[in-house]
Image (cartoon, rainbow, N blue to C red):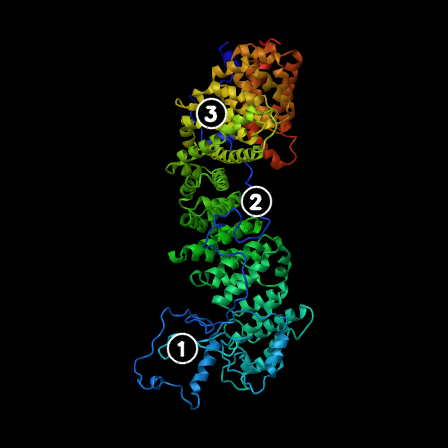
Amino acid sequence: MARKREICSPLIPQRNTPRKTCAEIVHEARQSLRVQSTQRPVTPRVEQRQLFGGNSIRVDCDNRPPSAFSLHAQNFDAPESRPGSGIRLSPLDHKPKFPVLCNAEDPLKAIPKPPSGPVDRRKGQTRARLLRTASLTALPPVEGHKEVTQRLNSAPGQKQLPSEDRTAVRRGPLKPEPQRTASGSTIAQSSVDSEERPTDCRVEQRTGQAYGDNATSTDKDPDSLVWNNSILPLLQQLESVAAGISEGSVDRPCDLCDELHGTLAKADMLGRRCKRRSGILRTLFRLIGLNSVQLNLHVAKLCLALYVSENNLLIICKLVFQISRSENNDTFFQKNSLIDLLLDVLSREEVSSSGEALLYCVGTLKFLSGNSVLLRLLLENNCIGVTQKLLQKLCAVQETHFTIAGHILVQLTATLRNLADHPDSRPRFAAFSILSLLCIVLRQHCNDQDICTNISRIFSKLSSYSECRLALAQTPDCYRLFLELLSKHHQKQDLVVRLLFTLGNVTAKSDEPRQQLFQCDGCVDTLLQLYKHYQRKDMPVQKEAALQKDAPSHRGAPARAASAQESDDVLVKLVRVLANMCIHPTVGPSLATDAAITELLMETLELRSVQESEELVVNVAATINNLSFYQEERSSIWRNEVNIAKLMLKLMLSSSLEAMLEATRVYGNLSQSKNVRDFIIQNKVHQFVVTLLDSKSNEMCFSACGVLINLAVDPPNRVCLAQEGASAKLLDCLRDFGPGDWQLGGQICQALWNLIGSGSENLLDPYERNSLLEVLITYLDEEEALKWTETGDARDDHRPHWESQFLPVAQKLTKVLQSPDSTP
């Protein structure tokens, strides 16, 4: 009799058994603690390409760089140390007085007069020098240019002005030019003949001297030979195009630019090695006035290959930026190898000297990275490696250039956000330590919402992948940084939801991040403050919506619905972080004893309905399930076990299978309490649980069996379960799922053991008893039980579960059914 009582004793979960590790629990109890998953927040697509989006904090900022600008002001390598001669200085406030050294009889006698002799040669040189340092302030219109050229060339007796490396030819009437005195100060000329113009020769007659050749070279000089024989003819043809003399399709000047580029490269004259580069640039810049997108890109390519700098570089970057603003021009970038030159600018230039040019350069890459074909070209040209160097420069920038560095970072992080979408980019983000650099940027620009939002989008994309998630988890103090940003920008929903999603990803796969996050100062307080803020900010709206549920819609309804959806998105990601942290064996018990967490979770179930907030309600139930695993004496979950059971009934009555599954799992834990078991029977919840056995879902059957195991501990409950046909449904589940899922098979056997144990075998009719014995005997034969598996590898995978999960309880159950003392 003692042996029989031992065999037939029900399987009661022991509350004081030694605690297993988290890995053993997940392995043996089949996700009794589970990681929550959710969808990544969607990055909104920007329809119009803008330097800063409409939601940017820089929209109304006075010092933000413009997205639209004019390209008429151009400068050809003019020295930056002094102003150009074409700048008119402001007049003095006082009137100069003549010196009082006059003859009373003849007042005009003391006034000095200009000499009547020949003009000093140096005066003419002053005029030429001022012309050389002048900047070309405007491109001439194409129309009428031929007429101006003919009129200039028709002037008899005019000589060409000397030209040097920085000569700028001006057309049209000259404004009064300032002159320099002996002391070095600059004064304005009193008068200049309005018809006086700098002389010019015909395009066909240009020589190397006219293109800025001030080198004392002979015709036998190799550079001069290349210049005269190869480069000069190409420049003359391009000058004809710019002057409107040569007409035809745009393909011809584009081909000329390509030929010029190839000739310069072959002669090793690219970069700053060409002595006449200013003349080449002057010709190229005149082509911009033709307003051809395709030709302008060829011009930009040549200018960047010639290493333009300062104002010239800014002009070219602005030009390329303007072209890239239209998606229709993306095809031109695909055919033009301009991307590698733009990346070279980012590698070569410094933020302190070329900050604005870098801004428009990176802005161009941001636009181009939205195109999948160009995105591939960016990756092939090592865009992420170049980005690493630029990020390091921006992190080390001085405070005087902090503002322009912030503007550049907005464009750069937006570009990285687009690059993160490509599968081939993810290992490179980890290899170049981009995630660690972005954390440094976040620390330095924590008050800049644009930068923080862009980086949070990068993290939310990359943290879904193991190599990037590991790189981020290994970044020092990233958890503390995220918590500080969540606290600082708690009202910026799009930033908060992505940081929480990232934390949920990092804590999903490893115990170490869960513990490190929990150990940060103020971690739980920050999360709870966010929970309260986003859960309760729409409470008046929800109450009003409940009162006006049947009332006609009003104007503010869509806005309130959108606000509630945004709040739900934040809460879904936040609750997921809590659920993942609960899995850690030391963090979980601490969270389970926190009454504030339990109160907020229960409040969510009271305020939200499954129909309107299904994902949030399901995640809350999963978090309660994880917390209910820890049966600590101070556990807030177990102190509110009956109230939680009532809230779970709301989920059981819904039409959502996910909600019913999570509620069943919670009942599986809470039904270890006698109070909860009584609540389940009194409210007919057991009927729903038995019905779930027909769901043909492994997960649903497994959770339902957990509830039945606990309910069958009480003898009165066995009769209620038998009346609902629980034994027959369990037998069907064993037939259907046993060979493919031995963990579920063992769970079914445990439920049957408790249902028919302690002299309750008569609850089985003879047919059910014989059928159950037949199935058990078949499954106890290892070869027979595993013959349904297709390959040897699959059998090896199933065998450990068959031995540990199914075999022990199946053997005990078979002995009970075969015992001669048992009564059918």
- Please rate how many residues cluster around mark 2, counting C-alpha atoms within 10 Å: few if below 14, some from 14 to 19, many from 20: few
Residue at disc 3, secondary structure: helix
Which circle's residue, 3 or 1, is located before the other in the chain? 1
Identify the residue shown where x is 60% and y is 26%: 656
- Please rate how many residues cluster around mark 1, counting C-alpha atoms within 10 Å: few if below 14, some from 14 to 19, many from 20: some
Q: Name the residue under label 3.
A: 628
Is 675 on the left or on the right of 200, as rendered? left
Distance of mark 2 from mark 1, alpha carbons? 58 Å
Q: Nearer the viewer, residue 503 or 2?
A: 503
Relative to residue 38, is residue 230 depicted above or below? below
Give percent across and percent down for residue 421: 57, 48
Q: Nearer the viewer, residue 573 or 446?
A: 446
Relative to residue 653, is residue 180 depicted above or below? below
Q: Mark 2 points at which residue?
A: 44
Image label count: 3
Residue at disc 2, secondary structure: loop
Give percent across and percent down for residue 709: 54, 18
